[in-house]
Structure formats: structure tokens, C-alpha cells
Amino acid sequence: FEDRNQQFILLNEDQLTRNRAENLKCLYDYRRLPANSYFELIEALPKQTTLQELVQLIKALSGNTNSSQARLAALTLLAHQYYWFDDLSILTNDTKLWKTVS
């Protein structure tokens, strides 16, 4: 966590809201995927964006026209906390994301 200035947070049952639980479920499988193949893209990505914009940017930067692969990359970066979002709201294409690395 230190290299990305991240914190480890424990949540009790009052803090684990339905939305947080849904977001964790959504990102769990992506957390299990390696993110290292996306490292070269991270520097070129913006500090603030939305999930939908991030997918489009990854698609353009990678030269891959496959939207599914770009979405996989975006969600993997999000699951590995290279981007942060307010997890009290359900993750959607319009969710604002903030980069956690420089």
C-alpha cells in the first residue's frame, strides 16, 4: 500500500453499506487479475475521469478496438486501487474516478 499511498481500512457492519458491498462484489474478480500489463498506460491516463471515459481512453491509447478488453483494463486498474471512487455510491459508467498514482 505504501508505494501508492493507500490505506488499509477495516469496516464494521454499519460501515459496510449495501452499495459498498455491491461495489466490492463487482470488483472482486478484477482484483484477482494482474494489473502489471497496464502499467505502461497509467502515466498517460488523466488524474480525474469517469469510468466510461477511462474505458475510451484505454481503448484509444492501447490501439485496441475491443471495448470489452478496455473495460477489463479499466476495472482491473480500479480494483487494484490505481483509481479511487466514492464507494458509497454504486459504480456506474458516470462514476467519477481519481487517480491514486502520479
Image (cartoon, rainbow, N blue to C red):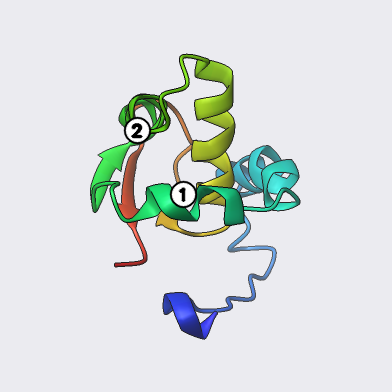
Q: Dot 1 lies on which element?
A: loop
Instruction: List the residue tagged with mark 2.
Output: 61
Q: Dot 2 lies on which element?
A: helix
Q: Classify residue 84 as left or right of residue 102.
A: right
| Most distant residue in the bottom direction | 2
Q: Which of 36 and 23 is in front in this view?
A: 36
Query: Which mark, by number, is residue 88?
Result: 1
Quadrant assignment for the N terminus: bottom right
Quadrant assignment for the C terminus: bottom left
Q: In which quarter of the image is residue 61?
A: top left
Q: Which residue is drawn at 37% across and 26% down?
A: 52
Q: Is residue 85 visible?
A: no
Q: Residue at x 60, y 43 (%)?
A: 23
Place of residue 67 in the rendered image (x, y in percent of width and height, measured from the top left): 50, 17
Q: Is residue 75 visible?
A: yes
Q: In which quarter of the image is residue 68?
A: top right
Characterize the local packing of mark 1: few (<14), some (14-19) or many (20 or more) Cα atoms within 10 angstroms.
some
Q: Which residue is drawn at 59% across and 32% down?
A: 72
Q: Distance between the residues labelled 2 and 1?
A: 30 Å
What amino acid type is highlighted by mark number 1?
Leu
**Which numbered mark, 2 or 1, is in the foreground of this view?**
2
What amino acid type is highlighted by mark number 2?
Leu
Q: Residue at x 43, y 52 (%)?
A: 40
Place of residue 70 in the rendered image (x, y in percent of width and height, measured from the top left): 50, 27
Characterize the local packing of mark 2: few (<14), some (14-19) or many (20 or more) Cα atoms within 10 angstroms.
some
Residue 61 against residue 56 in the figure, above or below: below
Query: Which mark, by number, is residue 33?
Result: none
